[in-house]
C-alpha cells in the first residue's frame, strides 16, 4: 500500500525519488519559449520527449508570497491566509507586513512531509520568504541572500557558502537565483533530500523581456541545473508564482493609474485607503507598482459609486467587491479591502504619485499582479498521467502532480 | 483662413508640409521599446525631445484591413464597412473575401485630399490592400509585392523598381516592408507628395518577439527611414493596425480553441458556422488563427445557450451578441454573425482543426485579433497640441492629429 499524508484536505504520496519543486519567480511562459527558440535551453527543448509541459493559473493577486505559500500548501490564500506582502489590519488600524509566519493559517506540505519522516530542504533567493516557507519545518531551510549566516541550529545546515563555491550575491542580481540552484545541486548530491523546494527571485524578469540576451542567459543557467537534477535521477517539477508583462508605452514610460490621488481628488482625503500588496522591503526594481490594489473605504455606503468611478478609468481592467474578489480569487475576506482593483495588462496601479520612488527603475517597468500575469508553466521531467484534461490546473497543483500523477 | 476638407463628418486641414502617415503592421508597442533599449532605434529614442509619443486603441477585430481602412477613413468599421478580410454574405449564403472596393461604404481621406488638389501617394506592402486604400484615389498607389507591374495609367507612377534600387522582395519577408519605406523615400525626394500613406506587413512581428535580434533589425531599418523623412522636412505620423502577442505555451505550442469542432460536437453539424475574418490569401505565417471569431447560428433562439457554452471554455475571453459587438466595437451589424467571440491574450480561435494548415508555422505562433492587441502607438515627430488628455485616442485619429493638432 502506498503511504499517503493528508495536508489541507488533499493527500500526497511520499516521494518515490528525490523530488525537486522549483518556483521560478516571474516566469511568464514566453521566457522559456524564447530561450528555446534562441537555442539557450536545450534541456527544456528536449523535455517533451520524456516529460510533460502544461499550463496552469496562478493565484491572483499574482504576487510572490501568496503564490509561494499556495504552492507549498497546495491550497489558495482562502486556506492559508497569505494574500499579499502587505495588508491593512482593521483592528490595529495599521498596514502590516505579512512576512511573519503568525499570519499563516495552514500547514505546509513541506512541514508535514518532514513530520512524516521525509528529508525536506528549502532554499529561497530572498530571505523574506524563509520564515513563511520554513514554518514548523524540521529540515533544511535557508536563503541565498543570507547564506553566510546559515547555521545548523537555525537552518539545519552549515558551511553552505563554502560548499556552493560562490560568494553570496547581491540581493538585486541574477546570481542570487543561481546561488539557489547551485545550493540545490549541492544538497541533492550530498544530503539527497526526499523533497526540495527551490524559489528564485524575479530580478531578471522585472528588468528584461523574454528573448533578450540577459533573459536568455538566465534561462540557460536554469536549464543547465534542471538537466543536472534530471541526470541525478531527481523528479523535477517547475512552475512559477506569476507571469510578467511590460507595463509601459512605446518608449518605455510606465502606464500608472495613481488610485489614491484620483480617489482623494474626487471623494476627499481620508475617504479611501489604497493598499498595494506588492509593497515589500525590496521595491527597487518595480517601485511598488503592480496591477492589483485593494481599497478600504471610510464610507462603504458609497461603494457602488466608487466602483463605477474606478471602472471608468482608462487602464483599470476590473473592480470587484470584497465578496466578489474573495470568491473569484479565493482570498480571505478579512485581509482584503472593500474593493479589489485590477490593472490592464500594460497598466500598473499606484497609490499617491509622491509615495512611489521610481528612481530605481533604470529600465522600462515590467511587473505583475493582475489576471494578465495568471498563466504560468507546469513542467515535469516525467510524463503526467491520470490528470483530467478538462481540469483547471493551478500552480499550486504542482506538488500534487509531482507526487501523485507522474508515470 | 485655413483650408479645410470634410470627410466622414470630421474636418481636416490641408497638409502644411509633406505629411507621411505610417501604419506599422502588428506594431505591439513593446517592439519599439525593446529596439530603443537595445540601442537600435536612435531616432525614436530621441524623438520625445521634439515630438510626441501617445497610445491609442485600434479597432477590434484587431486585424489589418479593418484598421487600415479605419485609419484612412478616420472612422470605425460601422462607417466604412470593412470589418475583416472575410465575411459571410447572408443573401448569397457564402463566405466572401472583403478585399474588393465595392464593400467600402465611405470615402477615404486620401481620395478626398486628392480631390481637393493635394498630391497623394499610397504604398502598401501586400497588394491585397491596394484596391481598398486606393479607392477613387487620383494619385500614386501601388504595392511592393507587385512593384514590377507598376505603370503610369494604373498606379500613377512607373519604373519604381529601378528608382528604389531593390529587387521586388518575396511576399513573406522583412524586405517587403523595407521596399515600402525605400519607395516612400524616393517619392518624398522626387514627387514630394503632400500626403503619403505607407503600410507595411507584419511578417516579422508574426515570427519574432520584441527585443529579439530579428525584430530589432526590422525596427532599426524603420528607424533609419523615419529619420530620413524627418530630415527631409516631412511630418511623420506613425501608428499601427494592431498589436501582436505570443499565442503559445512555454514550449511554443499554440493554444487553440477549435470553435467549429466544439459547436458541432455539442449542437450537431450545420448548426453553427464559424467565420475567422483573419483568413486571407496569405495565411502561411499565422495559419488563419487569430483571437477573434464570429459565429452564425442556424437557430438564433438558442443564442443564449450557445453564449453560455462558449463563455465557459478555457481560453475564451468574452462572447458578445451581434448588437453588443456592433456597439462596443463599432462594426457593421450586417457583416458580423449572431455572436462575436474573443480569445484570451495567449489563445487563438480556430474553426475545425482539419481546416487549418499549420505546416507553415516554422516558429511559435504569434498573432492578434482580440482586445489584447488593441493598444498601439501614436507617434509624431512634432509636438501634439490641443488634444484633450481625457480623450480616448484611436489609431484612426492619426491623420486628424497629424493635420490638425501638431505644433
Image: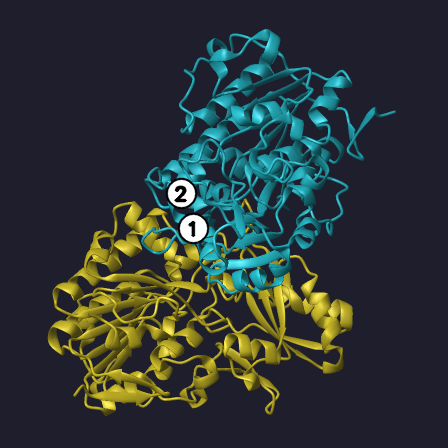
Chain colours: A yellow, B cyan
The residue wearing badge 2 is: B356
Q: Is residue A362 visible?
A: no
Q: Residue at x 35, y 37 (%)?
A: B360
Label 2 close to label 1 by CB (< 8 Å): no
Mark carried by residue A249: none
Return the disc, 2 or 1, that comes first in the chain's sequence: 1
Q: Whole-Å distance between the Cαs marked 2 and 1?
A: 15 Å
Q: Is residue A267 visible?
A: yes
Give the quadrant of residue B110. top right
Give the quadrant of residue A192. bottom left
Q: Nearer the viewer, residue B338 or B384?
A: B338
Query: Residue B209 at x, y = what percent?
Result: 41, 44
- Specify whether B149 is left or right of B88: left
Q: Chain of mark 2?
A: B
Q: Residue at x 47, y 69 (%)?
A: A62
Classify A171 as above or below B29.
Answer: below
Callouts 2 and 1 in the same chain = yes
The residue wearing badge 1 is: B247
Classify B226 as above or below B310.
Answer: above
Q: Nearer the viewer, residue B77 or B168?
A: B77
Quarter of the figure with the C terminus of chain B: top right
For numbered disc 2, what is the local secondary structure? loop
Q: Residue furthest right?
A: B1
- Specify whether B60 is left or right of B361: right
Amino acid at each position: 500500500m502506498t503511504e499517503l499524508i493528508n495536508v489541507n484536505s488533499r493527500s500526497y504520496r511520499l516521494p518515490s525519488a528525490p523530488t525537486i519543486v522549483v518556483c521560478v519567480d516571474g516566469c511568464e511562459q514566453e521566457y522559456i519559449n524564447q530561450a528555446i527558440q534562441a537555442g539557450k535551453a536545450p534541456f527544456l527543448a528536449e523535455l517533451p520527449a520524456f516529460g510533460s509541459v502544461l499550463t496552469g493559473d496562478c493565484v491572483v493577486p499574482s504576487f510572490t508570497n501568496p503564490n509561494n505559500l499556495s504552492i507549498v500548501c497546495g491550497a489558495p490564500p482562502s486556506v492559508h491566509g497569505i494574500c499579499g506582502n502587505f495588508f491593512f489590519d482593521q483592528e490595529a488600524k495599521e498596514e502590516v507586513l505579512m512576512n511573519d509566519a503568525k499570519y499563516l493559517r495552514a500547514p505546509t506540505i513541506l512541514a508535514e512531509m518532514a513530520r512524516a519522516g521525509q528529508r525536506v530542504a528549502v532554499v529561497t533567493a530572498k530571505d523574506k520568504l524563509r520564515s513563511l516557507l520554513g514554518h514548523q519545518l524540521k529540515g533544511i531551510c535557508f536563503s541565498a541572500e543570507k547564506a553566510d549566516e546559515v547555521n545548523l541550529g537555525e537552518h539545519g545546515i552549515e558551511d553552505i557558502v563554502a560548499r556552493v563555491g560562490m560568494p553570496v550575491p547581491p540581493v538585486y542580481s541574477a546570481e542570487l537565483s543561481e546561488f539557489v540552484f547551485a545550493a540545490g545541486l549541492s544538497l541533492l548530491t550530498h544530503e539527497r533530500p526526499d523533497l526540495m523546494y527551490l524559489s528564485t527571485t524575479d530580478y531578471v524578469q522585472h528588468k528584461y523581456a523574454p528573448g533578450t540576451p540577459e533573459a536568455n542567459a538566465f534561462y540557460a543557467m536554469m536549464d543547465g541545473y534542471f538537466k543536472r537534477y534530471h541526470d541525478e535521477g531527481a523528479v523535477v517539477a517547475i512552475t512559477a508564482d506569476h507571469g510578467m508583462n511590460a507595463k509601459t508605452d512605446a518608449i518605455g514610460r510606465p502606464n500608472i493609474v495613481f488610485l489614491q490621488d484620483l480617489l482623494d481628488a474626487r471623494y476627499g482625503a481620508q475617504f479611501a485607503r489604497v493598499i498595494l500588496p506588492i509593497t515589500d522591503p525590496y521595491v527597487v526594481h518595480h517601485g511598488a507598482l503592480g496591477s492589483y490594489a485593494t481599497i478600504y473605504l471610510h464610507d462603504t455606503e458609497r461603494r457602488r459609486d466608487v466602483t463605477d468611478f474606478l471602472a471608468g478609468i482608462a487602464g483599470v481592467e476590473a473592480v470587484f467587491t470584497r465578496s466578489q474578489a474573495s470568491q473569484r480569487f479565493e482570498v480571505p475576506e478579512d485581509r482584503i479591502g472593500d474593493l479589489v482593483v485590477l490593472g490592464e495588462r500594460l497598466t500598473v496601479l499606484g497609490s499617491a504619485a509622491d509615495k512611489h520612488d521610481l528612481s530605481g527603475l533604470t529600465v522600462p517597468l515590467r511587473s505583475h499582479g493582475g489576471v494578465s500575469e495568471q498563466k504560468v508553466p507546469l513542467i515535469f521531467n516525467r510524463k503526467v498521467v491520470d490528470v483530467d484534461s478538462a481540469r483547471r490546473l493551478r500552480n499550486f497543483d504542482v506538488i500534487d502532480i509531482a507526487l501523485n500523477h507522474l508515470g
